[in-house]
Image (cartoon, grey):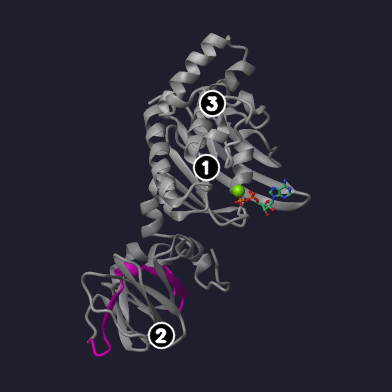
Amino acid sequence: MSGKGRVELVAVHKSYDARSAVSDINLVIPSGSYCCLLGPSGCGKSTTLRMLAGHEQVSDGDILMDNRNVTDFSPTQRGTAMMFQNYALFPHMSCLDNVAFGLRIAGMSKADRHARARELLTLVNMQDFAESYPDQLSGGQQQRVALARALITQPDVVLLDEPLSALDPFLRIRMRKELKAIQKKLDLTFIHVTHSQEEAFALADLAVVMDGGRIQQVGSPRALFETPSTPFVAQFIGGHALMQGSLGSRSAPGTELIIEGAPRGLLGDTQLGPFREAAAGTPVSFSVRSDHLDILPATTAPAPGRFLLPVRVTDVEFQGAFIYVECESAGSVPLLVYLPDRSQQVPEVGSEVCLGWSCAHINLFSPQHANPTTEVQP
Ligand code: ADP
Ligand code: MG
């Protein structure tokens, strides 16, 4: 471990003409980690990245890198390098000169900077294109050159703004593997902006979900998927059914969860979290992973430890390994089920069935989201 490249944002705020673009960002990105800023268009990802690069002034708060306060540093003083969405290669320069550019500005001799640029072209597997010009390269090749150009100044932190979005889907998957491999090999901190949940899940050690200029949740992709903390996160990352209910009476084995139309189930103290002391009648909102929902006959008998909810099947979509079954409960709540293609019978659209799931698979949202009033559209 180099131990360098730790980034911290402390109460960072940015507004443009009194309109907030980013609010109250508190975040620690450990050195050597692959961090993805994830969220819908306009949520403040690029603004956050530009403030880290020093291309944008913060309106309030501090940015620390390896415990130096860099808030007022110029971009070149920070030890960061930025890679842009459109690669921004100089069209009139060869790949070699594009990559060597940062060292030319720094005053290094031509022989030395070309030698170093060739090393970096080799790192990104573009050594055979040193004399080529950007318009002679494919999108994926241009992206590799842009990465080599960003790396030549030996940054501790590499900032990437939607680096894969201009590539076709096949190349995007290949390039993301290469980005991750280079990040691990060089042991640098990468901060990568994306609106793709799939990309963030594949790449991130630490994923930061943003909405409306604020952080919604920070964690490993697995933690986000298993315990999304807000309805927005559950909907944005997908693969969850969202429901509402209320707490019932408390007894030794657990606290009742009441869902309209379903037999009551019990939640243990760990699952209740901040609701541990909540009174009977407290409304709660929760998610269950779509792949943890079973589709059962309407006549299924209740069993301890499990919820059963009568629903009507409204749509069935074939998706390969999974079949997406959309259902609707009596309260018109849409619920998405992922049915493994190999194991179960696919229900007919219009049929009445029961959804079944284990009490252990219920993920309660934090109390301020217990009564979501607005539908979140990623
Ligand atoms: P994202 O990268 O997540 O799509 P941005 O960080 O680009 O979002 O934008 C966040 C918000 O800030 C948006 O509402 C956007 O319109 C606004 N914004 C971004 N840059 C500027 C700017 N230079 N001037 C005014 N508003 C801006
Ligand atoms: Mg952006």
The amino acid sitting under disc 1 is: Pro
Q: Select label 3 or label 2 by which is in front.
A: 3
Q: Earlier in the sequence, mark 3 or mark 2?
A: 3
Of residue 140 and residue 375, the one placed in the foreground of this image is 140
* The magenta stretch spans residue 186: no
Q: Residue extending furthest right?
A: 17
Q: Select label 1 or label 3 by which is in front.
A: 3
Of residue 232 and residue 369, the one placed in the foreground of this image is 232
- Numbered disc 2: secondary structure: loop
Q: Residue at x 62, y 50 (%)?
A: 44
Crowding near pointer 2: few (<14 within 10 Å), some, many (20+)? some
Disc number placed over residue 311 in the picture, else none:
none
- Numbered disc 1: secondary structure: loop
Badge 2 is on which residue?
260
Badge 3 is on which residue?
95
Image quadrant assignment for residue 299: bottom left
Ligand 1 within 8 Å of disc 2? The answer is no
Residue 343: image x %, image y %?
Answer: 21, 71
- Between the C-alphas of marks 2 and 1, the distance is 46 Å
The amino acid sitting under disc 3 is: Cys
Q: Earlier in the sequence, mark 2 or mark 1?
A: 1
> In this picture, which residue range is highlighted in magenta?
277-300
The amino acid sitting under disc 2 is: Glu
Residue 248 visible? The answer is no
Disc 1 to disc 3: CB gap under 8 Å: no
Badge 1 is on which residue?
163
- Numbered disc 3: secondary structure: helix
